Image (spheres, coloured by chain):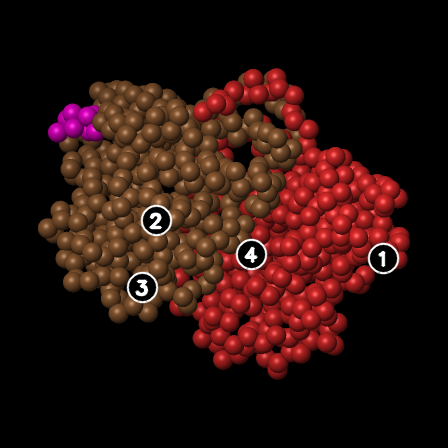
Chain colours: A red, B brown
Amino acid sequence: MTLTLDRQTAAQQAPERRVFNFSPGPAVLPLPVLQEIQRDLLTLPGVGSSVLEISHRSTAFDGILAEAEANLRELLAIPADYRVLFLQGGASLQFSMIPINLLRGQNLPASYILTGSWGSKAVVEALREGQVHVAWDGKADNFVRVPKDGELDLPPASAYVHYTSNETIQGVQFRRPPAVGDAPLVCDVSSDFLSGPVDVRDFGLLYACAQKNAGPSGLTVVVVSDEVLERCGDDVHSMLSFRRQAEKGSRLNTPNVFGVYVFLLVTRWLRDEVGGLEAAAAGAEAKTGLIYDVLDGDGGEFYVPHAEPASRSRMNVTFRLRRGDLEKAFVAGAADRDLVALKGHRSVGGFRASLYNAMPMEGAERLRDFMLAFRASH
Amino acid sequence: MTLTLDRQTAAQQAPERRVFNFSPGPAVLPLPVLQEIQRDLLTLPGVGSSVLEISHRSTAFDGILAEAEANLRELLAIPADYRVLFLQGGASLQFSMIPINLLRGQNLPASYILTGSWGSKAVVEALREGQVHVAWDGKADNFVRVPKDGELDLPPASAYVHYTSNETIQGVQFRRPPAVGDAPLVCDVSSDFLSGPVDVRDFGLLYACAQKNAGPSGLTVVVVSDEVLERCGDDVHSMLSFRRQAEKGSRLNTPNVFGVYVFLLVTRWLRDEVGGLEAAAAGAEAKTGLIYDVLDGDGGEFYVPHAEPASRSRMNVTFRLRRGDLEKAFVAGAADRDLVALKGHRSVGGFRASLYNAMPMEGAERLRDFMLAFRASH
């Protein structure tokens, strides 16, 4: 190993300059959280081992897991008859776990509302377990908007209705949950989790990978009602069973201990430093507002927004340049100003600025200033 | 957030004393690895973001993933027709993924050799997918040994034969793979992964959770032959499909980026500082030898070893006290000497000293000295 500096030596080096990271996920984390992780990396206070070394059955991790859940319950005002699960495998494993638990063996279809790439991927896995009904599909319109309630084609009964609150790739977001009647509403909240208040009672099950607003990759958070847990089938592999995971309090096997620890620090920061989810929502509105104002400033002559105004995401701003030949110059100019990871997903093209909770206002201001200057100089 | 010290301030504090951590997993990691993680936690060199913030599609992670795999290929001399997968969900999800991919829809049974708790758990999941044949079960003898080849009751043909190279809870380890004929040999190597050389060609599939010798929890490493991949079924959820994961090079969705990074650092340390797997095996032999010598020193009058000598683990040393009333004093005395996490699993009782690669010889020596002194004073 070439690099074996101790804590003292490391500190004598000037820390490298941190860039403004607009990555859609894994994504920017709050600097105070990173600093606390760094400070305690060798020895968690009072423990004498790194958080990377402690048993998931240790008293130290008992405390971490309990506080992580308590913070989430406080931030989202989660009712007592909902469980919080800390799982692995990302949102993609949930695309399978949900139909395995809730569609397998049912005589009802599961209904899916498709507003972008992620919801469309979820359907592929659901089809392995039973009948699927597509209640709305924005693909023909290139996923530029979410449906109005009246546009939904819902069957008389569904095992559940699934939608994606914010489509990270297209930058399309629901302002409020769709009205779907009595079926349990299941929502992939991966990319707008903890970005604003939600009424958990509107949902049967919420799930999010952590690597946008909540922590590092490798951790998935599920919030599920006891009522939905009771509907889950019995013929399910242990690790894929929501009920088994709930019975064992997310410790059916060894969870991602470090991921839960970072989630705890992020939720503490969100509560104590940001001021909770109302404040987070105001911040997201302000930051994305700066960029949308630029996009709207020229009537689509230079910058072309992807999403329709009423469906615009407050997390991921998607746009392209009218002149595609300027894309390389845009990326290079942004990088010169420490603005990185702005390239759009290959399926949409152009650019995407992800402005999660941990992106400081200064990052949004710098991006706005660069975009204005870039337009002025071309 | 109460704790928001910057790098300089953190370094001014004396680091807390690190204990000798005998946890079975998550377990002790090499100090130089922890120091490198700490040093670069805010900004990965040349990247300007934390490793916790980089995209799994970034150039930085391309390099991390490639080097992690290359290091493993070098350490284990993995043949070119084997794939390396970095997955999530621990060994427990493999208990399901293996029969889902290799037993579902087959007309052959899967054969299982049971030498402890983990293999016994694996069988429960396999039964969901097809016919299971137990080729040997050590439960009646309380899992104190592994079988001789002649004791195995193998059917004429098996979809695969599964065994557990080292049973962490019982401290029982195979010295070499069992002779099972033509069926693909599938092995859970979680708790002796990277502790010594193996001939990968003996196996169709090897899997390990990382949190013993290889990294933090939340990462699972699978080494699988192309021949076994071809046998995998098609009717498998994407995230649970070995073939799909292999096609996408472990990036079917976002992997545990931080886990792969730590795995890279651990494998680099193992190669460059430890000197490879032969040296690791010699170290394990020396460290556990110190403790087994204590256990053997009184003919079972004070300390009672769990495993039979020929099946003893070189990772997890399991024993109890003849006088159960002394257990609390043993734990307290050990803790006074910074020797922690020695309590045995509830299913076996007594004590378990896990001496993975990252446990320094000094830890084993201190434990030996304490055990000798404790016996002398009682």
Q: Which residue is mark 1?
A: A300
Q: Amino acid at mark 3?
A: Leu
Query: Do the residues bearing badges 1 and 4 touch, measured as CB atoms within 8 Å?
Result: no
Q: Secondary structure at mark 1?
A: loop
**Placement of the N terminus of chain A among the 4 image quadrants:** top left
Give amino acid for label 1: Gly
Q: Are marks 4 and 2 in contact (CB under 8 Å)?
A: no
Element type at mark 2? loop
Mark 4 or 2: the one toward you: 2
Q: Amino acid at mark 4?
A: Ala
Q: Residue furthest left?
A: B150
Q: Chain of mark 1?
A: A
* Residue at the image point whose x is 25% and y is 34% from the top: B314
In the picture, the quarter occupied by the C terminus of chain A is top right
Magenta stretch in the rendered image: B292-299
Q: Amino acid at mark 2?
A: Asp
Front-lying residue, B33 or B292: B33
The residue nearer to you, when weighing B247 against A308, is B247
Residue under numbered circle 4: A91
Earlier along the polypeptide chain: callout 2 or callout 3? 2
Q: Judge depth for marks 1 and 3 and give the one in front.
A: 1
